[in-house]
Amino acid sequence: MLKTFDQKLARIRTQPGAKDFILADAKDADMAFGISAPGKAVNPTGRERLRSLQEYRQQIREIAAQGLVDIVLMSASTSDRLAGGERLFDQSSVTPAIRANDTTDIWLAGAGASYGAAPSSPFRTAALDIALAIGPDGRRLPERGSVDLGLYSITLNNHTAHDAFTLSAYREFRMEALKKGFRHFLEVFAPNVGNAVAPDKIPRFVNDSIARLLAGVAAAERPQFLKIPYFGPQWLAELAAYDSELVIGVLGGSAGTTRDAFQLLADAKQHGARAALFGRKINFAEHQLTFVRVLRCVADSELEPVEAVRLYHAELGKLGLRPHRSLPEDLKLTPSTLRY
């Protein structure tokens, strides 16, 4: 099955005027938020409850069947079940991907957890051989589905020892990925430690860090695209202008209003982004399939953000679903965190 991600990426790289936009659903939150990762649902009595991991995975099945996103990013365990065991993506236009590494600053929301207070440190629990369906003898396991794309995440904090370790760990990952034919996209966060960089200097610090680290990366090991916070038009345009061959994607950030999601996508696309990855904004939506359908319209420049919010509410009404916010409230823009 041809994958829309590969088709769009090829056009973006070879046709400067291509209008293609890559959209990803980030369903890897179980590697960060633990028990609360699947989000909340309402039981028949009207009370909220936490969804189960099985419900979370069922949502992935539905998103994949819909076929409007180009990538579904999953934890290694979920990918092993759905992509490997069920071979969910074999006959789908959607590309499966795994979170290929962990960092201490994304281990969030646990009872008493304070990992995010210290400078980020990378580690890896996911095994590339398992994702690639390679057995202990080094041979391909034909009975299992294979995933050859993953997200690698780094957070730099202007701290010599921590940042050197982070960049060295990324190099080790790239060398293994190159040998095994595993592709990746690179996520670069803003510093997770307060006062590591002056707030007004953070966007340039991240842009400079990306330029420096990619300067040491050869074409064969280069990330397929970037996933970064959207710091605003100036900084995204600056990075896009620096390297026209760099495919830039933005992360969705915290849940926020529906307008927040649609406006972020439209603004990022206008100023140079060619991809966007939404996690909480999709997962916390009243109806994920409808949200993704309208999000796709914004990504393809078929709807403006305000128009898209109104359409989304209208569609919820047709489904008999009560929105989280009134339409006037959902049309508002709210601040969004730049950290995970």
Image: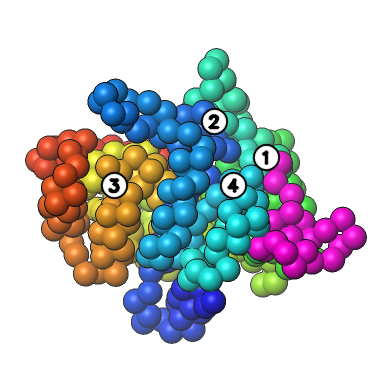
Q: For marks 2 and 4, give the CA distance.
A: 13 Å
Q: Nearer the viewer, mark 3 or mark 1?
A: 3
Residue 34: numbered disc = 2
Mark 2 and mark 1 lie on one chain; the one further toward the N terminus is 2
Magenta stretch: dominant secondary structure:
loop
Q: Nearer the viewer, mark 3 or mark 2?
A: 3
Q: Nearer the viewer, mark 2 or mark 4?
A: 4
Which is more toward the observer, 203 or 89? 89
Measuring from the top left, give residue 310's x and y in whole percent: 12, 52
Residue at the location (17% across, 38% down)? 322
Q: Which residue is mark 4?
A: 78
Q: Amino acid at mark 4?
A: Thr
Q: For marks 3 and 4, give the CA distance.
A: 21 Å
Which is more toward the observer, 280 or 141? 141
Q: Amino acid at mark 1?
A: Pro
* Residue situated furthest right in the rendering: 137
Which is more toward the observer, 113 or 135? 135
Q: Which residue is mark 1?
A: 122
Mark 1 and mark 4 lie on one chain; the one further toward the N terminus is 4
Q: For marks 3 and 1, give the CA distance.
A: 34 Å
241 w.r.t. 266: above or below: below
Residue 287: numbered disc = 3
Mark 3 and mark 4 lie on one chain; the one further toward the N terminus is 4
What SS does tag 1 mark? strand
Let me know if residue 2 appears in the view.
Answer: yes
Q: Amino acid at mark 3?
A: His
What SS does tag 4 mark? helix
Identify the magenta region: 125-146
